């Protein structure tokens, strides 16, 4: 365990020092700070537009960070040959891999946390409110975003055990887009579709592919409906976290199995 | 090592089953609370719009488009707003603000030079709200907005307004102050007893609220409801509603007895092409009552119901003008200029119908004191209509005029005038109008 933690903390430190990630983070933060000015243009529905815009920026920035952070984790170690130094020590391959993953998730959580804080400050200043009824949906959406992006990082980590970073970037992006469309597609084709073959395919995909749409609760954060379902949302969030943890577990086990047999 | 791999594969299988089970259990909640909604509405979307509407960033795109909408609104580019409203509601069907503002814009803001709104858009506004209700069935907002369009803008289908307001007040999040309008809708729909019951319900509710919270606004609302209920009961008494039910209506003096003869007459004069002056007389001297005037193509009536499809492209070949004629001292006189808005008033049909209607249920209280809620205190030898099934009396006069007359061409080049039976031209009074009293029924000894 100590080996995993040591590798994780090193990975976290490296991530914070990486300029590319910092630039992405800064761009995201800049957009979050600018976005309240859009409200000058909307006398009706200011709250709605503010939340929609900021959560959208948060989501895009987080997804880019998650992928950029993870796709290079293993290849960089191999390319710089630092992996040999690490694995020559009493460190198992799975410990190395888990350490890397937890380090990147830690960095991701930190960055999402920072952006959420900026978002909340912007919201409080703009809306002149500190009511948890308004802030709650934003905080809950951000918490679920951490799990959503951790799952995305796990996907990237799995692919990084056997493909190059560039291919990994596109593969992970593809899985993210598909996983984001899963529930709507299942709803449209799996439930109501009139082609049996399509129904079977979407049903299989629905339960086999990482389902990012299930973890996205920002849909209602900006709407009046969002404040209504707040109570039952906690149960849904708990289920979502369990789902994300289960799927992250699957991807990490697969990564370990592949990485164990990989020649480095 | 092989054993370790076997364990991992076992855990893998277990985790896979677990995630599938959790995903399955979450799906119904997702569908109820987070789904983009009825994809049937998405028919006609291009592939990129469909993908955008399903993707995780649809709210953000919707927000950007909403900002764009506002810009168009302030620039007066009203037509450009409609497709954007359509797109935003596809992208983010949970945004009630877009549905309510969009429907308001469609129903109210397309106006002619004299600020008459284009009624041809009302079915489209109702359709948009209907979609919003389907997407947001658990909150009062769009039920109320739909009821309001029927109540205020349609102003001719109050049972439907009642139906929507009744659903609105059932929602747990309804704003307390908005519930009172249901009683008004009951009154305009002729459902007096339901109005009494509803005022009584609200009165009791506000009393309970005040006792629980001590909030002065609840106390004020309680007073308002109590006052409304008292007024309603007094009116029902003075207008003979209870007397009629008790079978003693003829034994007492009620204002609604000896129905006032409206003796409605009208002159329709086309001053210039598409400029019509309607003037006439009727038996209501008091200020406040309005006569609804419709000028439309023969055979074209607007069904006050949601449009079958969400198509912003109107049939621009049809004409439908609706105006309310202000009356005072037994007269009305209004110049209706439709010449500056050819897209609203194309007048392509061979025959044009000019209609006049007075519905006593929408009249102000002081008029209703004489004519009654159901019009039992009025009559007209030419244009009186009585719907026995609904116990509803009203005034309805319709005149057909040829298209050449409204365009002042052909035989009507020199003059285009139609006088109803009994119409007598009178000199316009020079002195200021004096508000006259409605003649009362003679007192019995």
Image (cartoon, rainbow, N blue to C red):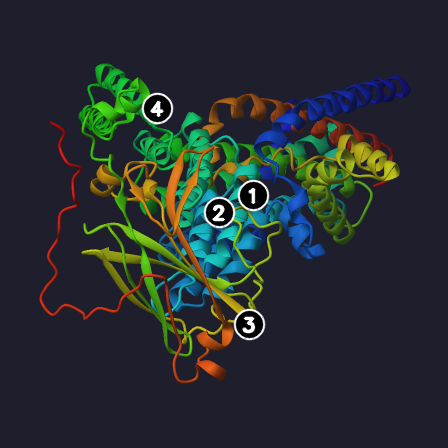
Q: Chain of mark 3?
A: B
- Please state, as top left, top right, bottom left or bottom right, where the N terminus of chain A lies in the image: top right
Side (left or right) of A75 relative to A230: right
List the residue tagged with mark 4.
B193
Residue drawn at point x = 49 percent, y = 28 percent: A229
Location of residue B266 with respect to B360 vertically, above or below: below
Q: Are marks 2 and 1 in contact (CB under 8 Å)?
A: yes
Location of residue B241 with respect to B270 vertically, above or below: above
**In the rendered image, residues at marks 2 and 4 fall on the same chain:** yes
- x, y percentage for residue B51? 68, 50
Label 3, residues with CA under 10 Å away: few <14, some 14-19, many ≥20: few
Sequence-first tag of 1 and 4: 1
The foreground one among B237 and A247 is B237
Q: Are marks 3 and 2 in contact (CB under 8 Å)?
A: no
List the residue tagged with mark 1.
B131
Residue drawn at point x = 45 percent, y = 64 percent: B78
List the residue tagged with mark 2.
B99
- Please state, as top left, top right, bottom left or bottom right, where the C terminus of chain A lies in the image: top right
Viewer-side label of 1, 3: 3
Q: Chain of mark 2?
A: B
Q: Chain of mark 1?
A: B
Location of residue B182 with respect to B337 vertically, above or below: above
* Kind of element beneath mark 1: helix
- x, y percentage for residue B212? 25, 15
**In the rendered image, residues at marks 1 and 3 fall on the same chain:** yes
- x, y percentage for residue B170? 43, 25
* Kind of element beneath mark 3: loop
Location of residue B27 by image quarter: top right
Sequence-first tag of 1 and 3: 1
* Kind of element beneath mark 2: helix
């Amino acid at each position: 365990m100590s080996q995993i933690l040591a590798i994780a903390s090193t990975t976290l430190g490296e991530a914070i020092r990486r300029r590319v990630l910092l630039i992405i983070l800064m761009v995201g933060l800049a957009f979050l700070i600018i976005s309240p000015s859009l409200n000058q243009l909307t006398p009706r529905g200011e709250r709605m537009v503010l939340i929609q815009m900021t959560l959208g920026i948060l989501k895009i920035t987080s997804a880019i960070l998650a992928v950029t952070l993870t796709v290079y984790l293993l290849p960089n170690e191999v390319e710089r040959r630092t992996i040999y130094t690490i694995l020559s020590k009493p460190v198992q391959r799975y410990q190395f891999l888990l350490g890397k993953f937890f380090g990147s998730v830690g960095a991701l959580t930190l960055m999402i946390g920072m952006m959420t804080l900026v978002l909340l400050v912007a919201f409080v200043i703009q809306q002149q409110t500190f009511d948890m009824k308004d802030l709650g949906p934003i905080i809950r959406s951000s918490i679920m975003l951490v799990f959503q992006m951790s799952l995305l990082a796990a996907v990237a980590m799995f692919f990084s055990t056997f493909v190059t970073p560039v291919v990994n970037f596109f593969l992970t992006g593809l899985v993210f887009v598909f996983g984001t469309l899963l529930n709507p597609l299942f709803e449209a084709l799996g439930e109501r579709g009139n082609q049996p073959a399509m129904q079977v395919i979407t049903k299989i995909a629905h339960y086999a592919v990482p389902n990012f749409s299930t973890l996205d609760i920002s849909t209602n954060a900006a709407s009046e409906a969002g404040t209504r379902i707040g109570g039952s949302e906690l149960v849904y969030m708990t289920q979502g976290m369990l789902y994300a943890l289960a799927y992250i577990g699957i991807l990490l086990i697969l990564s370990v199995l592949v990485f164990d047999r990989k020649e480095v | 090592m092989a054993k370790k791999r076997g364990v991992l594969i076992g855990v893998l299988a277990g985790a896979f089953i677990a995630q599938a089970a959790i995903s399955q259990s979450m799906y119904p909640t997702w569908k109820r609370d987070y789904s983009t909604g009825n994809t049937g509405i998405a028919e006609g979307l291009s592939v990129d719009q469909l993908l955008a509407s399903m993707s995780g960033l649809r709210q953000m795109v919707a927000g950007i488009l909403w900002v764009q909408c506002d810009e168009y609104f302030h620039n007066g580019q009203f037509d450009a707003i409609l497709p954007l409203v359509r797109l935003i509601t596809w992208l983010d069907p949970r945004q009630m603000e877009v549905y309510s503002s969009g429907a308001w814009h469609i129903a109210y803001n397309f106006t002619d030079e004299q600020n008459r709104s284009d009624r041809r858009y009302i079915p489209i506004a109702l359709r948009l709200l209907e979609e919003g209700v389907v997407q947001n069935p658990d909150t009062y907002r769009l039920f109320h907005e739909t009821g309001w369009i029927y109540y205020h803008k349609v102003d001719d289908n109050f049972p439907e307004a009642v139906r929507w307001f009744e659903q609105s007040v059932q929602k747990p999040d309804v704003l307390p102050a908005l519930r009172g309008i249901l009683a008004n809708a009951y009154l305009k729909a002729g459902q007096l007893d339901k109005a009494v019951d509803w005022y009584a319900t609200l009165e009791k509710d506000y009393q309970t609220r005040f006792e629980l919270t001590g909030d002065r606004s609840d106390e004020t609302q309680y007073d308002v409801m109590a006052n409304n209920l008292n007024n309603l009961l007094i009116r029902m008494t003075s207008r003979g509603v209870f007397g009629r039910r008790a079978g003693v209506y003829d034994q007492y003096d009620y204002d609604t007895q000896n129905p006032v003869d409206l003796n409605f007459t009208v002159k329709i004069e086309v001053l210039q092409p598409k400029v019509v002056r309607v003037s006439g007389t009727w038996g209501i001297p008091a200020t406040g009552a309005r006569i609804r005037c419709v000028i439309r193509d023969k055979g074209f009536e607007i069904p006050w119901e949601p449009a079958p499809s969400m198509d912003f492209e109107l049939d621009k070949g049809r004409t439908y003008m609706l105006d309310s004629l202000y009356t005072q001292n037994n007269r009305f006189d209004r110049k209706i200029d439709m010449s500056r808005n050819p897209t609203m008033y194309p007048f392509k049909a061979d025959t044009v119908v000019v209609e006049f209607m007075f519905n006593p249920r929408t009249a102000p209280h002081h008029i209703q004191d004489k004519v009654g809620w159901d019009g039992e205190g009025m009559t007209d030898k030419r244009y009186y209509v009585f719907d026995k099934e609904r116990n509803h009396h009203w005034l309805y006069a319709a005149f057909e005029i040829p298209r050449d007359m409204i365009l002042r061409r052909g035989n009507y080049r020199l003059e285009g005038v139609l006088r109803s039976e009994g119409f007598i031209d009178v000199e316009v009074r020079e002195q200021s109008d004096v508000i006259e009293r409605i003649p009362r029924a003679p007192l019995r000894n």
